[in-house]
Image (spheres, grey):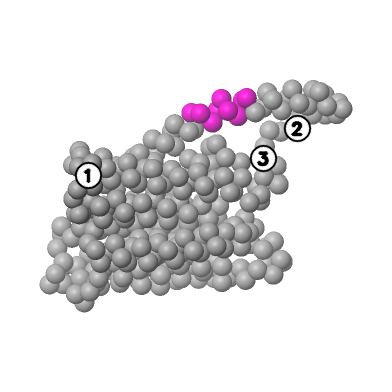
Amino acid sequence: MEILETAFMQRALLAALLVGLTAPAIGVYLVQRRQALMGDGIGHVAMTGVGLGFLLSTSPLWTAALVSVLGAVLMELIRTYGKARGDIALAMLFYGGMAGGVLLINVSDTGSTADLGSYLFGSLSTVSDADLTAIAVLAAFVLLVSVGLRRQLFAVSQDEEFARVTGLPVRALNLLIAVTAAVTVSVAMRVVGLLLVSALMVVPVVAAQQLTRSFKATFALAVGIGVSVALAGTTTSYYQDVPPGATIVLLAIGVFVLLTALAGPLARRRARAGVREGAGADTAPECTAELPLTRRPAEDVRL
């Protein structure tokens, strides 16, 4: 294939594969915690790390990862202890992170407006061998945490009080989720861009939830969607000369719309099957007819 004959596209496709795996893998916990926009906030903070990398003439990816982790920890502490003024503190952190990045890039000797755009919206040609190595290392960490600790992370995301009663280190796990989300932003920024990475963390998960009824199925389908749209968007970007980040996100939204359209008829068929099963059971029809068609608690926590 022509697309595999160029070295920069080989690197771009490998990076896209890793992004497609990692973004939904941690995004499923953020959606469960109702923190869908956390990735967007971390992306703003990561801009300071990118600017710092240019200023110090070092890898912006590693400095962005470091600053993102520090920002994510601060965000989690604000969420936990910020109380009434927490939203203002978070807003200051987000805006300050973006402004700091723009300022540092402009005062550095190596940065430029073009460099800034590639980090904000992604760029296929800018993924170097060093970037790919860093992305692979960071992606391995994200997958190790999100898959290896999936039961503990899901328990904390589902119900913090219950997780605390069972003896789980809730505060440490909350910080771990925040740190892993920050690392994911750094992994994805070269392909999707800092301003759009949050969409790839959230949209595949929400799309998967239209068809699945358990955490395990949602996780698997979300990752599958993430990989598919990341690779398809990167390929489309190469042949059509369009921005990769925007293409990937629009494809993910298209999948969400498609699965949402399919979910309605599927839910109605399940409802009719449930009614038929109820009619053949020993339970009186007047009792079963009034039961709401909602998810059972066991389905909410089934892994």
Answer with left or right where residue 200 lies relative to residue 207. Answer: left
Where in the figure is residue 161, as x and y percent of width and height?
67, 63
Between label 2 and label 1, give the one nearer the viewer.
1
Residue type at numbered disc 1:
Ile
In the image, the segment drawn in magenta is 261-269
Label 2, on which residue? 291
SS for callout 2? loop
Q: CA distance from mark 3 to mark 2?
A: 11 Å
Label 3, on which residue? 295
* Extreme residue toward the bottom, this view: 56
Where in the figure is residue 298, as x and y percent of width and height?
71, 47
Q: CA distance from mark 2 to mark 1?
A: 54 Å
SS for callout 3? loop
Q: What's the residue at 37%, 55% (across, down)? A: 18
> Which quadrant holds residue 126?
bottom left
Question: Do the numbered discs 3 and 2 sit on residues whose CB atoms are within 8 Å?
Answer: no
Q: What's the residue at 42%, 53% (across, down)? A: 21
Q: What's the residue at 55%, 36% (across, down)? A: 211
Residue type at numbered disc 2:
Leu
Q: Is residue 132 magenta?
A: no
